[in-house]
Each structure stands twice: as structure tokens, then as C-alpha cells.
Image: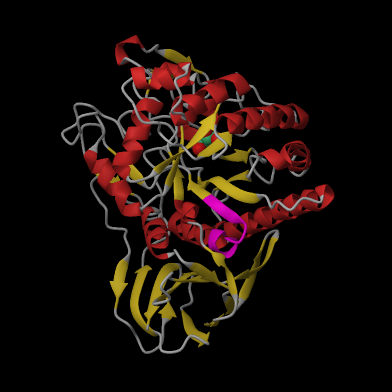
Amino acid sequence: MKAKISLSKDKVISKVDDRLYGSFIEHLGRAVYTGIYEPGHASADDMGFRKDVLDAIKELHVPIVRYPGGNFVSGYNWEDGTGPKDKRPKKLELAWSSIETNEVGIDEFQEWAKRCGTEVMMAVNLGTRGPEEARNLVEYCNLDTDTYYANLRRQNGFEKPFGIKLWCLGNEMDGPWQIGAKKPMEYARVATETAKMMKWVDPSIELVACGSSGPFMESFGEWERCVLREAYEHVDYVSLHNYFGNQKDNTPYFLASSLVMDKFIKEVVAICDEIKEEKKSDKTINLSFDEWNVWFHSNEQDKKQERWQIAPPLLEDIYNVEDALVVGTLLITLLKNCDRVKIGCLAQLVNVIAPIMTEKDGCVWLQTIFYPFLHTSVNGRGTALVTDVDCDKYDCEDLKSIPYVDSVAVLSEDESTITIFAVNRSMDSKSELDIDLSGFDGYKACKWVALEGYDVKETNSATDSHVKTVEKAIPETFALEPLSWNMIQLKR
Ligand code: AHR
């Protein structure tokens, strides 16, 4: 099989917003407790944060981490996680039928984020609470005034404001599973009034309104239109969430998941622009794809979990090679749409549908999906280029014309490097690459990193981390192995 990848100097998609490589930590399962936080662990720092986990996360260079949920946030009282730890209440947590000890809250998490070199993307509870509690939280986090909540933060030991810039107006409020789920107009009204009050407290913040929990939601489209008609001038982004799984054990079909993501993005962009036109507004609403990943492996085992445990092992998907290829193509899709998708959050970061896993009292280990995320996050910054791929295609069930080779290229800020990300979806054929760089003179291939040669079902574990990317020698002609993820860098 052959594929021709064509780039041209004057065909750019957009500058990539670094926040495309964000992630997510929810108070869910072992993400926080025995994940990022485990006082007593050999690597714990003075606040109980695991330094081995911090080191693994730092490798990924995630610029933002969404917190504290997720479904969790819709029943959360942020005040419970502040102040002296011995006074914090232990509560029933209804989103995941667990017990929340509140040992970690925003006081600790913002400190963890600093130690991690990342920023907090904070969600407010619009399930059981509303504008009042949200504006108090903005004051607690961001203000320097001599007023109650800013003073409460000082009293809790934090003189300087946390300076949280990016905020989510609730989570998946369209989902019947959500605590305090809403009809479109109910959410549209509360989101608008909450947004106004939060920005009155701190006009420098940016706000993300909840879009649909997936393109499969019955209210998809109607929800976005209703929310944007009310909230348009008060919010900056609309959110998208989408998880993928190989439920039918059909690898060619699963590998085409990114076509579903791409269609979803384009439909939401069209709705945002339709409402812009309707309102004759100068403002463009961009997209925050703040939950995306593969999620399905743990579904059955999670049904067997006993209720009301502290930090039960929930959503602990063990990822294989085909999952890593899908994550690679989802990242390519986000980059192809980076003119409108400004924020992305790989859901999630540690233990819960995560690239990084921990053993309680033990080691950190890396899942297969860690690798495409690592290389794309580190090297996929700069300007995304229109990348034409001419190759064979296949049809699978309802998905048609699926290109065997999926690819996108990014030009670094200083224009010294072109990085091409490419996945070969073919189960059995190598794909020879012809790279046409019109207008990019003097660039020469200097690095090739690949995840290849494994069975699609191979995984890593705490004791065996053999699935990983390898650096390959530069050939005369590149040939992508069947079922492989690749990064090719050219420098001038
Ligand atoms: O990321 C896991 C869960 O998926 C989140 O809590 C929720 O927002 C989504 O349904």
C-alpha cells in the first residue's frame, strides 16, 4: 500500500493552543487518594503528594488539569475541602457511590498543580448548587479583597490568590445520570446567571458552558442551541465529551472512532456559528473537548464494586495497543480541528481511565496510551498544517471511506521542525510514505518514533511495561508498519 502526505507552506489550520493537551483529575476511584495523593508512600512529599506520580505527569507536559469532576462536582460542596483537615466532613458521594473524606480539596489541589507545573481548570457545581456558591468560590480562589471568602483563603494559609483562569459551568448537565440533571432551558438559565456573577467577581476568567455529553444524546443540537441562545455573550467555550470502546471486538471499526469525533466537532462548530449569525455577534464561541478517551474495559467489573468505599478501584481500564492507536488518531483529529478546538482534556490522568497507574504502597506504571499522548503533547505545539493524505480507504458498518493512513503535521513555533503524526490502520499492509513538502525547503527527516509490531491486545502492567514507543533509524523511504502509530520529525 502507498500513501502520499502533502503539506504546503501556505496551507495552515491554525496555531495550536497548548491547552489542547490538558487532562483531568476527578474525585473518583483512586485518581486522588492512592493516585496523586498518598501520605505515607515512600515517595510522598511534605503535603502527601506522590513525587513518583508527579514525575510521570511532568513528562506529559499537561498545561491544564480539570478538577474536581466530572459527575462528582454536581454534588460537591467546595467548602468541605478547605481549612483544617481534622474538621473536614466525611461524606456520602452519590455520583460514584463512594465515601469522600475531603482530605484533598482546592487548597491542596492548586498546590499540587503548582508542583506539577500545570494550571487548574476548575468546575463549579450546578447540580445541587448554583450561582451563589460559584461566585463565592471565584472570590475564594482569585480575589485579593478584604472580604469574607478571600479572607477565608488567607485564614486557611494562602495569602496569595490561586489565580484560576479557566472555569467549567457544571458538568454533563444534560445526562440523566448527573446529580441535578437539567432540561436545556433550565441549564441555559442557571449557566447564564452563574456566568454573569462569576465574571462580575473576576472579569479575567474564561468560562466553558456544558454542551452535550456525546453526539448520541437525544437532545444533542437542541441543547447547544438553547444554551448558546441564552448564554452566548457570557461564555467563551462550549464543551464536548466523547468516549470510545471496542465493544463489538471489531478492530477495523474501533480504529475508525476518530471519524465519529471529527463529525461531532464539525456539528458543534456549525451550531456555534449558526447562533453567532442569528445574534449578529462579533464573538466566536470555540470548543473545549474536555473529556475524551477510550473507556469500556472496566464497565463490567465496576458493576461488582461494593458501595460506600473510600477510593475504590473504579474505571481502571487496562489499555492495549489498539486503544493506543485510537488515542493517537483522536489526537490527530483534535489537531486537525485546532482552529476551533482550543482546549482538550484526556480523561483522565491517574488510575481512572488513565495513562498513568499506581500501586498503593508501590510503583507507578505507564499504560500503552501514555505514549501517543506523550509525543503529541511534547512535539505537537506550534502551527497545525493542512495535511492531505492520498491513500486507500475502507468501509466498515456505518462508517464509510475510512483512510488507512490518518495523519497531521505541526510546524514548530521557530519553524525549525515539522512533526508528522501518522497512524496506519491497516491490519496487514505496510504503507509506503511519499512526503511532499511544497514550499518547505531544506527540511530533512531526523527522527522517527513508532509504536509498532505488537499484537493489538497486548497491554502493560505493574510488572511488565514492554509496550512502548521505540526510536527507529531513518530509512530511504518511510514504510509505516500495519497497526502502527508514528511520529516523523524533519528539521532544516
Ligand atoms: O470521566 C469519567 C466520567 O465520565 C465523568 O465523571 C463524567 O463527566 C463522564 O460521564
- Residue at 34%, 10% (x, y): give it: 87
Q: Position of residue 85 (x, y in %)?
A: 31, 16
Q: Which residues are magenta?
A: 334-343
Residue 157 among magenta residues: no
For this orientation, the residue located farthest to the front is: 146
Q: Is residue 254 left or right of residue 482?
A: right
Q: Is residue 383 left or right of residue 365?
A: right
- Residue at 24%, 36% (x, y): give it: 50
Q: Position of residue 487 (x, y in %)?
A: 40, 70
Q: How many numbered discs, if any? A: 0
User: Can residue 129 be seen here?
Assistant: no
For this orientation, the residue located farthest to the right is: 278
Q: Quadrant of residue 254?
A: bottom right
Q: Quadrant of the C terminus?
A: bottom left
- Residue at 46%, 31% (x, y): give it: 142
Which of 358 and 145 lies nearest the eye of the viewer?
A: 145
Query: Height in image: 423 above or below 262?
Result: below
For this orientation, the residue located farthest to the left is: 42
User: Can residue 466 be seen here?
Assistant: yes
Query: Height in image: 439 above or below 12?
Result: below
Q: Position of residue 128 (x, y in %)?
A: 60, 18
Q: Quadrant of residue 270?
A: bottom right
Residue 336 among magenta residues: yes
Q: Position of residue 189 (x, y in %)?
A: 73, 28
Which of 252 and 70 lies nearest the eye of the viewer?
A: 70
